[in-house]
Image (cartoon, coloured by chain):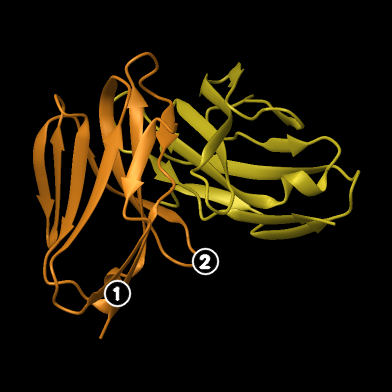
Chain colours: A orange, B yellow
Amino acid sequence: KNEVEQSPQNLTAQEGEFITINCSYSVGISALHWLQQHPGGGIVSLFMLSSGKKKHGRLIATINIQEKHSSLHITASHPRDSAVYICAVSTSGSARQLTFGSGTQLTVLP
Amino acid sequence: NAGVTQTPKFQVLKTGQSMTLQCAQDMNHEYMSWYRQDPGMGLRLIHYSVGAGITDQGEVPNGYNVSRSTTEDFPLRLLSAAPSQTSVYFCASNPGSGNTIYFGEGSWLTVV
């Protein structure tokens, strides 16, 4: 069983829809990262959080440490949001090493 | 500010050849790492470094070698390329625990 599980693996939405991507982990963590990867491109960090909630533009990330669960929300989705979204955790034993989920492929249709 | 720079972006190797993937960062980050990304799998840590002169193995180190002679540079060497090393490679850096991580643009490697 992977230490970091993401769901869904694939998600197709219509422009304007509210989108939620989930991440569950099974180990103690010091921080959780949400990353974005566009086709053929590099990986960009969206959020790093260890508690509560963070918001940047139309993106919101939440984390529940007790339930070992995080969600990434996108409000008013747009085709340019189409990308792979990756959850990664820094484990308590080694705060600078990351364990990654396998990613969620999001496609937003116009 | 260039961030994390990886070269080359694309490379085709023959089985048994050796090569070096270059990674440089200009943010004075202590921590640098190399990952490989394969279809259907999350990124996996190959090697990492917590500072100049210090390196350690990650989850999938076999067939790869690294060195960290300066804070800026962290090259990854493939000693004798194998088809199983066909992958996309990412270099990353961050200043330390609890900080944002920065990735390079990726290097697409095919071993035939």
Query: Where is A98 relative to B107, above or below?
Result: above
Q: Position of residue A84 (x, y in %)?
A: 39, 59
Q: Which mark is residue A40?
A: 2
Q: Is residue B72 visible?
A: no
> Mark 2 falls on what kind of element?
loop
Query: Where is A88 relative to A17, above or below?
Result: above
Q: Position of residue A22 (x, y in %)?
A: 24, 47
Badge 1 amino acid: Arg
- Residue with the mark numbered 1: A80
**3D distance between C-alphas at marks 1 and 2:** 14 Å
Within 10 angstroms of label 2, few (less than 14), some, or many (20 or more) residues? few
List the single residue furthest toward the top. Answer: A93
Tell me what residue is drawn at x 58 percent, y 27 percent. Answer: B59
Tell me what residue is drawn at x 36 percent, y 29 percent. Answer: B95
| Marks 1 and 2 belong to one chain | yes
Q: Position of residue B106 (x, y in %)?
A: 56, 53
Among the two numbered marks 1 and 2 on one chain, the one whose residue lies closer to the N terminus: 2
Badge 2 amino acid: Gly
Q: Chain of mark 1?
A: A
Q: Position of residue A85 (x, y in %)?
A: 34, 55
| B43 sits left or right of A20 in the view | right
| A89 sits left or right of B55 in the view | left
Q: Quadrant of residue A33?
A: top left
Q: Chain of mark 2?
A: A
Q: Is residue B47 visible?
A: yes
| Quadrant into which the C terminus of chain B falls | bottom right
List the single residue furthest toward the front. Answer: A1
Tell me what residue is drawn at x 64 percent, y 59 percent. Answer: B9
The residue nearer to you, when weighing B74 against A57, is: A57
Within 10 angstroms of label 1, few (less than 14), some, or many (20 or more) residues? few
